[in-house]
Image (tube, rainbow, N blue to C red):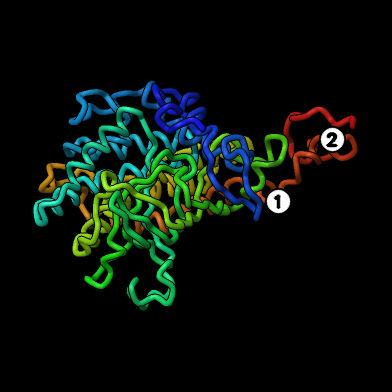
Amino acid sequence: MQSIDEAIKGISTAEEYINSLRGRNLKVYLFGELVEDTVDHPMIRPSVNAVAETFDLALQEPELATAISPFTGKRVNRFLHIAQSREDVVLQNKMQRRLGQLTGTCFQRCVGMDAFNALYSTTFEIDARHNTPYHTRFKEFIAYTQKHNFVIGGAMTDVKGDRSLAPHQQADPDLFVHISKRSHDGVYITGAKAHQTGCLNSHWLLVMPTMRLSENDKDYAIIGAIPVDARGITYIYGRQSCDTRSMESGDIDAGNAQYGGQEAMVIFENVFIPNELIFMDGEYEFASMLVERFTCYHRRSYVCKSGVGDVLIGAAATIAEYNGADKASHIKDKLVEMTHLNETIYATGIAASYQSKPTLSGAYLADDMLANVCKHHVTKLPYEISRLAQDLAGGLMVTLPSEQDFRSETVGHLLEKISKVEPMFQPSTG
């Protein structure tokens, strides 16, 4: 089987990225069945395309989507860059909004970028207290991933079991990822991570603790890097609303057929992490620092939703024009309200970035209060934007018959007539 180094050597374009995902021995289940080809599976491929867009953007807009690495001195994808200034943190947000506009969905690389930055400063402070080698190891790993232009996935959210109990108190220890055995060369981990964005479309996973830990939870205080195709990992693909539409033929029913998001459950069964890829092992008191810094970066990363909002607002304005209602004052008011809500998300996120401050490591960290306000808005405002878009589109859009009906020799002409549009399809003769 092709090694990871061989697979992605020289990767720079979207096409090269997609080819780097082929030929891997991943154990992936979808609808209870083993998926033989994750790259070209119709329900998975849109998510691959979304990540691929991050490579093309780096080539097309390098000032936005790349940066000069302090480790290699070379220009690297911004998703692999450690923020060295307030402007670096701001440019992350601007890149995220642009990618949201280009894909209209989740492009899946923000978790890895935010994990990189959180781990950089956290490992620095662990080493300062414990004289450990984690920060040096992590810098070497960063340079390695930059050289190959890897996609990094972050694995933080454990399934947690009884949430009133600490990890070591759970009836089943595997409800939190933990060290299951040790060897001279490294450790083995067992457990599960839920809601893992873009995990199949990554080359490496950074496994991290999910919450504050105590001394009794030392075996859960493990951070390490693992190849996505490592032995002992099983992926169970997650569901999204209307996801099977991407498996249907045609254009109307598929929705955003070109791009899509991805989440999966990741099961670890004695998965090996070599010593050189371990960045925390038992330093439980730093677990909360890592989680807090990661969430600070990641919650202001939700400005990506404003890029998706831009797409939805544009579509709503276009369909209002198609319906001949674009001049009505209440239509304009709704578009203004959608824009107001969308810009509120962006404003709080980018304000958090503009108020970044340096950590002891020199890496810049966003303002935690504003980052949390951005996340708070994201839990509510996109739903109102969507509701207004549906209102502007009208009920016919919501209950539109299938594309096959529009193509039908029998009823297609009737649908074209009542939809008040020019014929979109030739009637089916079959």
In the rendered view, does 236 fall on the left or right side of 5? Answer: right
Please say if 164 is above or below 407: below
Does residue 103 appear to the left or right of 96 in the view shown?
Answer: right
Pick whichever of labels 1 and 2 is earlier in the sequence. 1
In the depicted view, which residue is nearer to us: 160 or 253? 160
Q: Which residue does the numbered mark 2 point to in the structure image?
A: 413
The one of 156 and 139 positioned closer to us in this rendering: 139
The foreground one among 269 and 313 is: 269
Q: Say few, some or many: other residues with alpha carbon within 10 Å of mark 2 (under 14 / 14 to 19 / 20 or more).
A: some
Label placed on residue 399: 1
Decide which of 267, 362 is in the foreground and name it: 267
| Place of residue 9 in the rendered image (x, y in percent of width and height, measured from the top left) | 40, 24
Task: Report how far apart the C-alphas of labels 1 and 2 lie in the structure.
Answer: 18 Å
Q: Which element type, helix, strand or loop, lies under badge 1?
A: loop
For the residue marked with disc 2, what is the amino acid? His
Q: Are marks 1 and 2 in contact (CB under 8 Å)?
A: no
Residue visible at 40% across and 50% down? 341
Question: Looking at the image, can residue 347 be seen?
Answer: no
The reply to whether residue 107 is in sight is yes
| Residue 118 location (% of width, % of height) | 24, 49
Q: Quadrant of the C terminus?
A: top right
What amino acid does circle 1 point to?
Thr
Q: Residue drawn at (18%, 45%), measured in percent from left and top? A: 135
Residue 412 x, y percent position in the rendering? 83, 37
The circle on residue 181 is none
